Image (tube, rainbow, N blue to C red):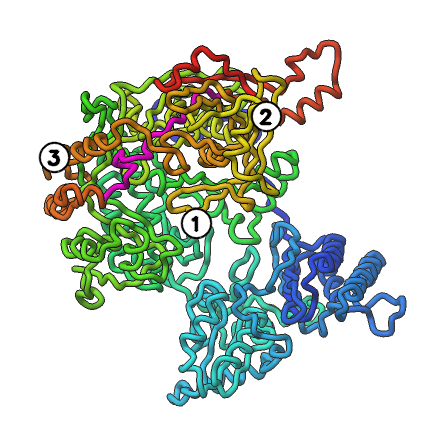
Amino acid sequence: KSEAGSTKPMASSTQPEQPAPSPQVHTQSVILFYKYAPLSDDETKMGLLRDALEALCASLKLTGRILLGMSTDAEGINGTLAGRKEDVVACTLALLGRASGGGSRPPDGVTNEAHQSILEAFWQQSEEFARVASVPPLYLETPEDFKWSTVQSSEPLFPDLNIKLVKEIISTGGKLSSVKLEDTRKGYLTPEEWHEEMRKLGESAKGGSNNDTILIDCRNHKEYEIGHFEGALDPNTKTFEQFPRWVGQNKSGLEGKNVLMYCTGGIRCEKASAFIRQVTGAVSVRHLKGGIHKYLDQYGADGTFHGKNFVFDRRVGAEASSHVVGKGTGDDSNVEPMETSDTVVGHCLYCKGPYDTFTPDGVCTVCREPTLVCDACRSGLREFHCSDHEYLRSCYFTDLSAYSVDELQSQLEELEQHLERMAVGKRFKQKRKTINRQCDRVRGAIVRFSSGSKGNVTLTSVPDEKNCRNCGNASCDGNCWGFHGLGRKEKLADEKTVGAKDLQTKRTRNRASANQRSSKVLQRERDVEEIRALGLSAPPSTHRNANTSLRCPPPCTRLLQSSVKGKWCGKTVQDVLRSEFADLADNEYTSQLMAKGLIQLNGVPVRCEAVGLDGDRTGISASTVLKNMDVVSRVVDWHEPPVMVPESISIEKIELPGNVVEEYNLRDSSTDDDTSFAVFCCDKPDTVPVHPAGPYLSNTLTMMVEGQEGLEPRSLRPCHRLDRCTSGLTICATSPAVARLVQGRMEGGAVKKLYVARVCGSFPSWEDSSDGLRANAIAPSAESSWTWGGNDTDSAYVEVNAPIENIDPINGIRAVRDSGKPSKSRFRLISYDESTNSSLVACYPVTGRGHQLRVHLQHVGFPIRNDCQYGGNDTAAGTGSLKDAAHRAIGDASKASSVSATTSTNGIQENQAKAAKEVCRCCNGREEGVISSFSSAQLLGGGHAIDLHAYRYQVTFERKNSKRKRKKLEKESTDTNTADDLSSTLATLEFSTNLPKWAQLCKNVDLSWL
């Protein structure tokens, strides 16, 4: 602009830019073909035929898709190819087989000597496949088996050549496997015969006498939408796999009828018509030979087909008038253009105006099915919904960043209303799954946005343009869309430029780990909210009795939920409650819970008897059969068994070395700049479980350490397991990456472990004094043995090789069995106490089976003291009085609590909390109720604490691919290579904890690694 605001262009001495040259338009020929024929189900043999076709098409510079069915019966070949006319003609001649007479003269239409050599090579390879597979050569019968199209385009119709071996050349998911080869090739109608049938059908319809004939469109709904024959019935399928189900649902309506069928090229009708003959009582079943394509070649827009023919290349829809009257060789050079009389039969889903063009940015945001959305409607919408998902237009969106918290909350409420209407019924299974997944996404977005500054105002950073739903590019012109999208060509080109390692990584499916999936993340957020609201994460001194050292938190009201497992499906609610939940095995008690509405299925109370018909949401019968995706929930007055803990838990925080952090890319794995790459070495007391499980929540090591150290709830992750009755070293981490690394070291055998145990009897110190071992141990078997190791009395140890099997999974009891997993342990005597007839023994587990040390010590005849589960005498002082104290602790905690203090934040109402307290066994059943709620060991009545202590761990961190790198360095060995260069070890860390009172003698003993 000038200073006066003039908009005249300023003079310039430079030459104006020349317009870009228009892309050159080429004439391309397209052929469609198929043939059902016996081939082979051997992939190696089928590879010969695939190689022959690849060589043929590549030599002729053709692109497209060919499917080869791996079957000895009703499969064959299904293809679509495009290229220059002369090359496509040569391909059709190749697929028709050798010229009659077998001479060296080129076949008609092939004057190029190069073409002749290409065809000869293909015939030789095809006949070799036929010989190996013992089948006739796969040749089409006549030129009429090809459907031709001629397209003017500046771009290739297909990005590449793709020849695949498949189970079915037209996918049905095996639904039409009953159709055999002899069932096909029946009921053909030529285009002329079909046209006459359509004329008669139209006249009958006008006279109202066409009830005996049914015209069926075998294609999918999106194909029917943009073009179909007059009066055709739309099965409304999204995939051909759904067609057999439609036939089954309409079987009675097809009986006694004359059925006419059609599809794009005839391949689907071959099997669909045979299937209808098999399962229905139709008088006759006939179909259009060559499909819509051949019919339009003959009649174009002057026939009874109206609209566009859906095609499987970048055109998507071909107008009826664009078809030409083709010869067998695609000769259309002298064909006069037909007068255009195309009609638009499709309509926009939103404004209902005429529209019949599918576009890449017009796919359904729920199912990605192509939808018809006109230009005017597209400009005012961000996302689109197909006809099947119209009911979700106001509540289901992929991009949630464009909505405020209030809008998201409104979407969530509407989605939940849809879920309520679909709560029962197998036919709603997939819809429930889809809506539940979206509900999780919306809830997650609400949590994230509520913690930020978004508020009730839409973020201004949301871009105005809409990205392509297929490739994600805002500037996409539509070439990426569909199987044949040209976006694939660019991806293939990119893959060729990357290395083999990167290519393998690129093809690997990236799936979030279980803890990173949206449903798991949302559940973790709910758990954290509940823990904070109820104050469950607290140091061990909270709720601890200083006189008895017992810690017993007050009860609280909680909502316990469980998704239906596979083994529950098909069983009634009552049967699952009785068999899967020990405290609900009592029918009378379970009936009380149901009467008060404390047990729910999908949020609806479960009653003992049926209470209403479909649509009555006041209750569900206990005899209701459970289905996948169902959720069983229960409101409980939550009590925890007491544990014995010190005033504070001994913890040592140790940072991992920098070279370990860098080698394993721990910083890249972290999303928080303040992440600590440290491990917490915790001295776990016996009677305390490591993490929440069963009846334990607040009384667990991780919860108490989080409270003591001021950590976020659910942030401390244990790196290994330790039995509840065992005390000692437990390694945890707040960084998920560190926890996975240490856990991997544990499972990979890169950790040495040293335990201290006090066993019953005099454990032998050397082979010469092993009479006691021989007398006590179970006799060796073919798989089980024990031997002595070491050079002298100071280094002697007993090595036990005895496989361990879990013989009682419900109660977690193991035993030595020849059919168990290989297990090895080593034991060495430290000292013997004659007054108690007990021995201190150093224990080294070589493998890491559950209860391994306990089972092996029992196996050699020296069970651990107080381990009554594995043969140890219960010698714990004051066990009876401790059990009484545990009972009193639970009772005192119940009396001190109130309903208002127990109500959780999970939507539990005050009346539900009162009802849960009224039927609580611990609150109202006194001692009998407590005993029925917890096991003897949980009530500190024996077996709750054994004399086994995890004392010391040694963890070795190695370089990644250390063996490979070491070999490489050894090959390239020079004088400059040092021992550190060749070493695979990055660092070795040793962790230890305090010894318990009964093992203080170990302080004066050098416990070296075995």
Q: Tell which of 710 and 463 is nearer to you.
A: 710
- For badge 3, the amino acid type reads Ser
Q: Could you tell which of marks 2 and 1 lies nearer the N-terminus?
A: 1
Front tag of 1 and 3:
3
Q: Tell which of 850 and 791 is nearer to you.
A: 791
- Relative to 821, does residue 719 appear above or below in the rendering? above
- Relative to 984, does residue 98 appear above or below in the rendering? below
Q: How many marks?
A: 3
Quadrant housing the C terminus: top right
Front tag of 3 and 2:
3
Magenta residues, as a range? Answer: 933-953
For label 1, the residue is: 361
* Residue at screen point 89% across, 69% down: 103
* Residue at screen point 46% across, 35% down: 858
**Image coordinates for residue 259, horizontal then vertical, percent:** 49, 82
* 940 inside magenta stretch: yes
- For badge 2, the amino acid type reads Lys
Q: Which secondary structure dominates the residues rendered in magenta?
A: loop
Q: Residue furthest right?
A: 104
Quarter of the view holding residue 4: top left
